[in-house]
Image: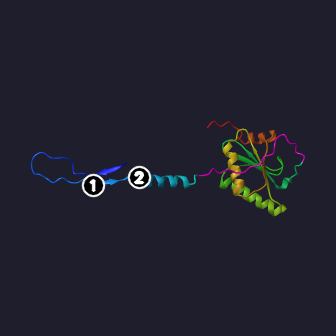
Amino acid sequence: MAELDTSGGGKHKGGKVRSKKQSTRIDLTAMVDLAFLLITFFIMTTTLAKPKAMDLAMPDKDEKTKDQLPIAASRSLTLLLGSDDKLEWYLGEPGKSAPEVINYGKDGLRKLLVEKSKEVQDKTGKTIFVVIKPSDKSKYKNVVSVLDEMNITNIQMYGIVDITAPEIELLKRENLYNDTKK
């Protein structure tokens, strides 16, 4: 039991005779119980930060691609993820348009996705399809950044596929296929 003792102390030697003070005793048990009840209540009713995850549906590697629909080259944008937090992109088929190097973020990738999505919508009347091809030199955070940008720019049609040898050569030409030890 918790108590608070506020007595005046013991006897003093010599001098005047003083009257004995009665000790005041306050029982703090109820207050301690209430404090623990409140702490328990707030701990149990608080919601902790929930992890945020993005849904991503990927096909099985074993399934044959018999039910794939072709997508016109005029509405496909390919992103080649390279090293040094940079990516290369081209519209349509490889070799028919000059690839360009950009950065991630709102001034690079987001701006590109918004512009090209509007451009394809105006020309074809259909939505853009983005092909994401991470290289083995790109980082996991780069793939996550691209997926975040797809979500931010509200592009619903995209796919993650394996990068081909000619596309690796495009990355090597721009020095985006380097080993980065950071």
Spatial CA span between label 1 and label 2: 19 Å
| Residue at 37% in and 53% down | 28
Residue extending furthest right? 66
What residue would you read off at disc 2?
32
Amino acid under disc 2: Val
Q: Residues within 10 Å of mark 2 (few under 14, many from 20)?
A: few
Q: Which residues are magenta?
A: 49-66
Q: Is residue 34 magenta?
A: no
Callout count: 2
Question: Where is residue 8 shown, x and y percent of the image?
Answer: 22, 51
**Camera-nearest residue between 160 and 76:** 160
Q: Is residue 65 magenta?
A: yes
The answer to whether the residues at label 1 and label 2 have Cβ atoms under 8 Å apart is no
| Residue at 72% in and 42% down | 174
What residue would you read off at disc 1?
24
Q: Is residue 179 left or right of residue 73?
A: left
Q: Residues within 10 Å of mark 1 (few under 14, many from 20)?
A: few
| Residue at 70% in and 50% down | 146
